[in-house]
Amino acid sequence: MELKTIKKLMEKFANRKEQLYKQKEEGKKVFGMFCAYVPIELILAGNAIPVGLCGGKNDTIPIAEEDLPRNLCPLIKSSYGFKKAKSCPYFEVSDIVIGETTCEGKKKMFELMERLVPMHIMHLPHIKDEDSLKIWIKEVEKLKELIEKETDNEITEEKLKEMVDKVNRVRALFYKLYELRKNKPVPIKGIDVLKLFQFAYLLDIDDTIEILGDLIKELEEKVEKGEGFEGKRILITGCPMVAGNNKIVELIEEVGGVVVGEESCTGTRFFENFVEGYSIEDIAKRYFKIPCACRFKNDDRIENIKRLVKELNADGVVYCTLQYCHTFNVEGARVEEELKKEGIPVIRIETDYSESDKEQLKTRLEAFIEMI
Amino acid sequence: MELKTIKKLMEKFANRKEQLYKQKEEGKKVFGMFCAYVPIELILAGNAIPVGLCGGKNDTIPIAEEDLPRNLCPLIKSSYGFKKAKSCPYFEVSDIVIGETTCEGKKKMFELMERLVPMHIMHLPHIKDEDSLKIWIKEVEKLKELIEKETDNEITEEKLKEMVDKVNRVRALFYKLYELRKNKPVPIKGIDVLKLFQFAYLLDIDDTIEILGDLIKELEEKVEKGEGFEGKRILITGCPMVAGNNKIVELIEEVGGVVVGEESCTGTRFFENFVEGYSIEDIAKRYFKIPCACRFKNDDRIENIKRLVKELNADGVVYCTLQYCHTFNVEGARVEEELKKEGIPVIRIETDYSESDKEQLKTRLEAFIEMI
């Protein structure tokens, strides 16, 4: 019972590398990025291409561990390894890679990576206050200047407006998808939505819009017919799950759960909050709000999770941390506590990209899903 | 051949708890702190007491792991555990605890700790640029206001000048100690200097000045007589070694090395650079320069290590990382590379507060010291 649109998504993805090289041949510049904090509106307005970078595979970790400590998050090691091994087409096609001072593992890894590829680092401050916002607005302005310089294209007000509207359209479509997932049965599996988020970082934005539009139509029909998936409804929260890292979602859906939402950078943190206006400041403000655990006093994330559980009619929460990710790991204690206060079942999982913990995780998830 | 002054230091330390409670009874406020970034001049100028907090023992880690992940640096876990167990007199006597956004482990741990003790968090930005310095100056101003409010004492220009001069005097004395350690044989063992740094965070500043003055005289006499310690001269660099955590220095000096310097927060990062002027800005600027690995592009630390090796006539460098400390761990790769370029022998060690790796470390350090 595969969704037609997901089949199409996979085709688009399979074709992306070729399309990207073609776009580059036509003279477009490519900006690689790691993170949901990069304001892609600006890159698009510079007639350039934003593209997410690989970092979801175990294969590239050994080469990374030649330079990086073993005790470091697999996403960071895998990303670095992909660049070092030159095995990620998105890295290879990037003219410049945009990093940010989110978590310290990435921040310090960038000091090594910038010897392998031209990089530009955006300073995202630790705190969510007015002075920090001012720094962030300046950083977004600096990014605009960099893009203009690299692309030799002026980012006009008109062009920026067009792209703010376009990226907001993607956000609106993801919001619609979320609405549809409130239904019982839920018309789409979590694994398909995860792929959609993963590929939204990689695909051409017009393709993403097309796919999302088609998907929503297809899902609306299913909802009307009452078709979909039953099972314990799970909200996932925690570290991003970039392409290649589907382990937890697959396991949940193997043992009788169905993922109905993900509070994640491959999830709500990717699309929540519209850019409300057309200035650099408006853009900066939207991204500044992203409730990543790397920020100090990230209470809005906790509120968000509670709200999502209710809105999506979730039966329980799976809190996923990548091994050695201090920020999501430590914040997990408070999230767990707050959820328990509300009587919401929660299980915390720490994992990496290996297969070795799969059976053990399966047993734990099975028990959790039976219990709730 | 124990130094008289070190005996005196131990006595002062043994008496510190009682003295602190007495000072508190007399109406002085106590400000606990974790880190070399806290400008103690301001606390002293408010007629209050700055005191370092416990965090060097394994014993308090199990209770911390009830709330914090196992995969977190022992210093952070131990600190949190000390507060939770109420087993650190300096924590218990603190009216307020000053944290800072240095590493993310501490930053996120503070979100839990502030439920156990009143805290004030200073925002130290990731980057070493002008905008970040402006934020830091504001943070130092805010700290001044907080101290005035908490102590009900006005921090006058006069008082501030007095305390800037006093803390600079401590720095000058530590510089002198460093000069003396350049001698062959070196007149003092590393383990004694480590205790001096550890206790400098804990003792009354007047006692620290007295001890340092006495020690310098004692060491000058020894140098004149040509007395001291021979052995492979080691510079230690990396994570701080707070009171209780002497493992690596002890091991180095057991296997035929002698520690002649420490690029550490219990070392040069504690005293290098004077406050050059008497304004808040002057104070802020001095602390902003501290080359902690938590900062992005911390190249001055690498330059510092190379300079120290030369100045102290070190034969080799032991790079110490506390387990799961991403910043010092990742930065270690660049430090190692740069030292090797200069032909300086270096060994990298990752350890925690347990005794379990002691034999293995001893073997590695023995081999390293034989080799150099």
Image (tube, coloured by chain):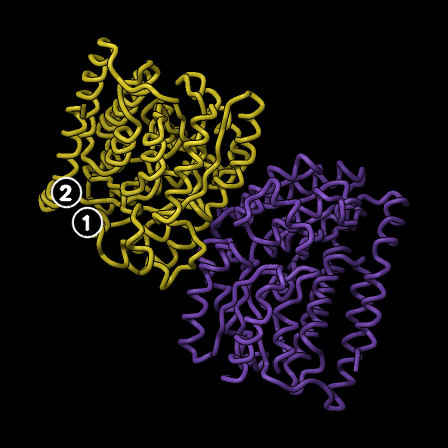
Chain colours: A purple, B yellow
Q: Residue at x 26, y 25 (%)?
A: B170
Residues at marks 2 and 1 on the same chain? yes
**Which label sits in the foreground, 2 or 1?**
1
Find residue A122 and report its image quarter: top right
Find residue B277 and report its image quarter: top left
Residue count near mark 1 (Cα–Cα under 10 Å), binned few <14, some 14–19, many ≥20: some
| Rendered location of residue B336, percent (x, y) | 54, 31
Image disc number at residue B20: 2
Q: A138 or A64: which is nearer to us? A: A64
Q: Residue at x 33, y 51 (%)?
A: B78
| Rendered location of residue A325, percent (x, y) | 52, 55
Find residue B60 and report its image quarter: bottom left
> Residue B119, relative to residue B186: is it above or below?
below
Q: Secondary structure at mark 1?
A: helix
**In the picture provided, is B119 more to the left or to the right than A138?**
left
Q: Tell which circle, 2 or 1, labels the residue nearer the N-terminal end.
A: 2
Number of disc labels = 2
| Rendered location of residue A353, percent (x, y) | 62, 59
Residue type for callout 1: Pro
Q: Residue at x 72, y 49 (%)?
A: A42
Q: Residue at x 44, y 26 (%)?
A: B370
